[in-house]
Image: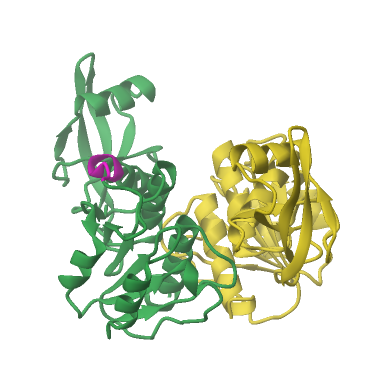
Chain colours: A yellow, B green
Amino acid sequence: MKAKVRLYVDQPLGAAQPVPLTREQAHYLLGVMRMGVGDAVALFNGRDGEWQAEVAEAGKRGGVLVCREQSAPLTLPPDLWLLFAPIKKARTDFIVEKAVEMGVRRICPVQTAFTNSERIRQDRLQAHAVEAAEQCGATFVPEVADLAKLDRVLADWDTSRRIAFCDEALAGETGRLPDAPGPWAILIGPEGGFSEAERSRLRGLAHATPIGLGPRILRADTAAVAALTLWQSALGDWA
Amino acid sequence: MKAKVRLYVDQPLGAAQPVPLTREQAHYLLGVMRMGVGDAVALFNGRDGEWQAEVAEAGKRGGVLVCREQSAPLTLPPDLWLLFAPIKKARTDFIVEKAVEMGVRRICPVQTAFTNSERIRQDRLQAHAVEAAEQCGATFVPEVADLAKLDRVLADWDTSRRIAFCDEALAGETGRLPDAPGPWAILIGPEGGFSEAERSRLRGLAHATPIGLGPRILRADTAAVAALTLWQSALGDWA
């Protein structure tokens, strides 16, 4: 029987491996989804690929799954990071969800001159990333980093990782991704764009390239999906 | 003074043209935004480009703007339609917003075998399209069509308009857009994908092409932005 539920667990997966459920997982699988002994669940942990498991014990206080066989190997997305300036809560959640679906290795919220957020709930965003991975069939979950100042991030940058930056002030420019392999990051400006100082700093970096996203001004969440699409189809795992 | 507010109005725009405000517009500009006589507003109506106007009369019961000069000509997006199967309310709103930002001429909600919605609020979705156009700097607002059955839509189709269709069952396929000019439509399948009958019908149409959106399963709203990005950058006004 093919599993209808796909669940992220933070435990080792392997043949005949028992996986005790957390209270929350037991509530979801046994309570909400009304599963019982013998029902199938697909599991992944971000390291061991996807495994078909089944419910081996189901009780009032918890349950245990047992892995049967691997149904997919671990597949890492390309070595691409997404840097973005957090915006309103719903749209920030959305950007994290979209980054996972589109396939990135790491999600880095950055504070820019025109970013409103002083802080983020990293744990909540990480949980969103897990949910998105459960939903989109990924076997890997990108880490959501803590909020960091863009200035600091750029100062500490390993310049072997190229940066493609998108800015609403570039609407109408036709910057294209250079056909360069190797690690990349996409940087999405906040609504309101980068400050002049940020923009000239970015333009001065040899490892950074502006990319254009058409003549209309895109919201940050739209820009994230669009830029990730351009990158994935040119240099990533859509090619 | 550069206008901070950009407003869609359903009235003719031209030099010295007075534009009486509806009660709702007067409430927004004069009440919420606290504007008064002399303050600047950018106007567009989807036909006459963008005009800089200013508040000429502001009273308790309404107000009048007067157009000064045109600040942008009417710019139509490319002749691209978006067909999609409406999903949960928030994500349907989102798809309409994204379609406007990305630049389409017409937005067509379609009912497929696996579409949950029996009906949509066309007026509400059209209002979303207007808001998105106000926000993204567009001078054109795509029409949101009424919900129609996909079978019917395909039966009545003008075959000079090509269709690029995306389906979650195609995840991992690498179908590419043919380099063909002329009118196009992008068709996004519902979550759960097309039915077998729909899929084989689409595959049998000479004017339809499957396109791949990478190895992960994208939600319908992500797929819409990704497919519009591929089209705009290959055949549209991002090229």
Q: Nearer the viewer, residue B215 or A49?
A: A49
Q: Quadrant of residue B20?
A: top left
**Residue B76: percent from the left, percent from the top?**
27, 63
In the displayed structure, A92 sits above or below B220; it is above
Q: Nearer the viewer, residue B50 or B171?
A: B171
Q: Is residue B126 magenta?
A: no
Residue A166 relative to residue B147: left or right:
right
**Residue B165: percent from the left, percent from the top?**
38, 72
**Residue A95: percent from the left, percent from the top?**
59, 50
In the displayed structure, B19 sits above or below B186; it is above
In the displayed structure, B196 sits above or below A62; it is below
Residue A120 appears in the figure: no
- Residue, far top: B60
Q: Nearer the viewer, residue B103 or B216?
A: B216
**Residue B51: percent from the left, percent from the top?**
26, 46
Q: Quadrant of the C terminus of chain A?
A: bottom right
Q: Quadrant of residue B198?
A: bottom left
Q: Quadrant of residue B12?
A: top left
| Residue interval drawn in magenta | B119-125
Residue B112 appears in the figure: yes
Residue B106 relative to residue A220: left or right:
left
Residue B56 relative to residue A11: left or right:
left
Q: Quadrant of the N terminus of chain A?
A: bottom right
Q: What residue do we see at 27% from left, 52% from top?
A: B141
In the displayed structure, A29 sits above or below B54; it is below
Q: Nearer the viewer, residue A84 or B56?
A: A84
Residue B143 relative to residue A176: left or right:
left
